[in-house]
Image (tube, coloured by chain):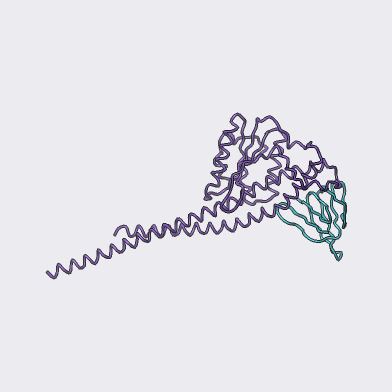
Amino acid sequence: MGGLKEVKDRITSVQSTIQITSAMKMVSAAKLKRAQDAIIQMRPYAEKLTEILVNVSSTLDTSEGGYSVQREMKNLLIIPIASNRGLCGPFNSNVIKATRALQKKYEGCEITILAAGKKADDAFKGTEENIHGNTLPRNMNNLFNELAFTTVSLQAERIMEAFIQKQFDKVVIIYNQFKNAAVQNVQVEQWLPAVAPEAEEKSTFVSDYIYEPSKSEIVEELIPKSLKTQFYKAFLDSHASEHGARMTAMHKATDNATEMVDDLKLVYNKARQAAITNEILEIVGGAEALND
Amino acid sequence: MQLDIVSPDKNIYSGEATAVLFPGVEGSFGVLDNHAPMIATLKKGAIKITKEGNTEEVVEVSGGVVEVLKNKVIVLAE
């Protein structure tokens, strides 16, 4: 009899959990749509930029600016891109795990970590790796408040500047690449020194362009643009992945909670029925005792 | 000719144009129909688009790259 009230309370509490998780799922679905649109919007720009860059630099020997200089590996900058919020399954922990693995791999080097997203920042805050020069911010959490090219590329510029100043010899970005709402892959991508874009065969048929200014000047202008685009794309991918991961996680949570409510209802009804049977037995027993 | 102005965030302009005036780094230049293939970089300024019927439209950019190829003009603006 005593269990009845407790079971009822639990049912109510699980039901309110369902309301929260399903609402979060809906919100994530809407945000995912917008994040995906941003990726799609970005695509023509990125593709065209790479195409022009390949086109121009294919006829030029790779005498690019300071962004592709291979230096001896001493200072490594790792940029893990996670999110400011949790409740999104393994999304954040995967990035943190990959970052730790990379730290181990480059044990002998001076490693600096510049986290984007509160969850990654919390994981590395206060560690030795998180302290660095004053030209860079301590984290980049605020970028997620409103993800826009202008703000992201501003940070990219600062990091590129630090690379040119030889503060770092290599910059690696770790982020969740967006495949679809259910699948996100953790990518460990070398950002600097710049990896030359792969030349596709189709770009060879028109090379008699008029260049204004000269080819090398155009390349010099294009490479930072392409780097910034790559940087921004990692953020967009991560953003879309975050909402995808949260949507999936919340969907599962809702399913589990619904199942739990069903089970609890069964327990509740059984207990209720047992209580009624008991009561009737008592009444019948009492009546019989009077008859005797 | 077909003109597309795209930025990483959005599609700024897409449509037909009869003449376009660009703020090139080495001075402004115009592009008309059947222009030779060209790649040029832009500085901060305004792109003036003349559409059919002599209507004009102005798009502000803070830099970018233009590719002209086979009556297709693509501007990667910032």
| The chain in purple | A
Residue at image location 33% in from the left, 60% down from the top: A4
- Which one is in front, A243 or B39? B39
> In the figure, residue A94 lies in which quadrant?
top right
Is residue B43 rendered to the left or right of residue A130? right
* Residue lying farthest to the bottom in this orientation: A291
Percent across and percent down for residue A244 are: 57, 53
In this rendering, the answer to whether A202 lies above or below A30 is: above
Looking at the image, is A248 positioned above or below residue A217? below
Q: Nearer the viewer, residue A263 or A288?
A: A263
Observer-nearest residue: A125 or A202?
A202
As drawn, the chain in cyan is B
Q: Please state the total of marks drawn on the protein image.
A: 0
Closer to the camera in the image, A214 or A167: A214
Q: Quadrant for residue B5, please give it.
A: bottom right
Q: Which quadrant holds the N terminus of chain B?
A: bottom right
| Horizontal and vertical percent position of residue A169 | 68, 33
Instruction: Residue at 53% x, 57% y: name it.
Output: A25
Image position of A74 (left or right of B36): left
Q: Residue furthest left?
A: A292
- Horizontally, residue A85 falls left or right of residue A209, namely left
Left or right of A233, for residue B63: right
Residue A275's spot in the image, x, y percent?
Answer: 28, 63
Location of residue A197 in the rendering, given as x and y in whole percent from the top left corner? 73, 42
